[in-house]
């Protein structure tokens, strides 16, 4: 039996104002929509076609802060895939997602450029993304060295000073 928890979210929508509330994870996100419980106790079903992004937030007071921090200022340090998502209306957002493209069939879950700010994680439904571009692989096992270095051959090494 899986456990579920309520998470604070801010649901950014394409044509309407953002919704704040709580989503029961994982049951609240279905293939046809998102069930959002408002702080006043109203349950709203939001179709996934309307949802731009589901931001898991610390507090509700700050509004849609993900729009302020959309891109990394330098190469991210967290391991995973560094991606740029273009929404179907042309807006862009960067983030780091797990190095597993099949992690969530309903959409893309990523860590935003500044997870210490307000948004801890952002979920983007597949219907909201026009393109997803991989900018880099952070922490790739292909670049790890075994720690063994080749010995330097004295005959092939150039002398710096005569």
Image: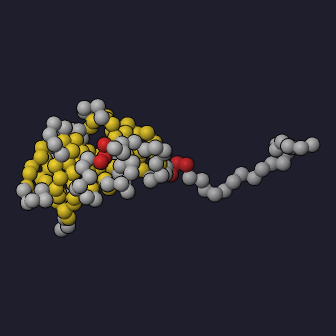
| x, y percent for residue 154 | 84, 48
| x, y percent for residue 138 | 47, 48
Q: Residue at x 8, y 51 (%)?
A: 44
In the image, taking residue 62 as reference, residue 27 lies left or right, namely left
Q: Nearer the viewer, residue 137 or 64?
A: 64
In the displayed image of the protein, which residue is found farthest to the front?
Answer: 61
The answer to which image quadrant residue 57 occupies is bottom left
Q: Nearer the viewer, residue 103 or 73?
A: 73
The colour scheme used here is secondary structure
Q: Nearer the viewer, residue 12 or 105?
A: 12
| x, y percent for residue 43 | 7, 55
The answer to which image quadrant residue 22 occupies is bottom left
Q: Nearer the viewer, residue 124 or 71?
A: 71
| x, y percent for residue 73 | 46, 43
- Number of marks in the rendered image: 0
Q: Quadrant of the N terminus?
A: bottom left
In the displayed image of the protein, which residue is found farthest to the left?
Answer: 42
Q: Residue at x 19, y 62 (%)?
A: 6
Q: Is residue 43 visible?
A: yes
Q: Residue at x 36, y 45 (%)?
A: 69
Q: Is residue 49 visible?
A: no
Q: Residue at x 24, y 49 (%)?
A: 63
Q: Quadrant of the C terminus?
A: top right
In the image, taking residue 98 as reference, residue 53 lies left or right, namely left
């Amino acid at each position: 039996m899986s456990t579920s928890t309520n998470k604070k979210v801010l649901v950014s929508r394409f044509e309407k104002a953002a919704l704040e509330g709580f989503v029961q994870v994982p049951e609240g996100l279905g293939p046809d929509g998102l069930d959002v419980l408002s702080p006043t106790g109203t349950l709203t079903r939001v179709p996934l076609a309307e949802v731009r992004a589901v931001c898991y937030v610390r507090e509700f007071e700050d509004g849609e802060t993900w729009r302020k921090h959309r891109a990394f200022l330098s190469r991210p340090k967290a391991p995973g895939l560094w991606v740029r998502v273009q929404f179907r209306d042309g807006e862009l957002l960067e983030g780091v997602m797990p190095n597993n493209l099949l992690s969530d069939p309903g959409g893309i879950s990523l860590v935003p450029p500044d997870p210490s700010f307000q948004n801890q994680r952002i979920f983007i439904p597949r219907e909201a993304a026009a393109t997803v571009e991989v900018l880099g692989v952070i922490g790739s096992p292909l670049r790890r060295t075994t720690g063994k270095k080749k010995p330097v051959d004295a005959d092939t090494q150039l002398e710096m000073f005569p």
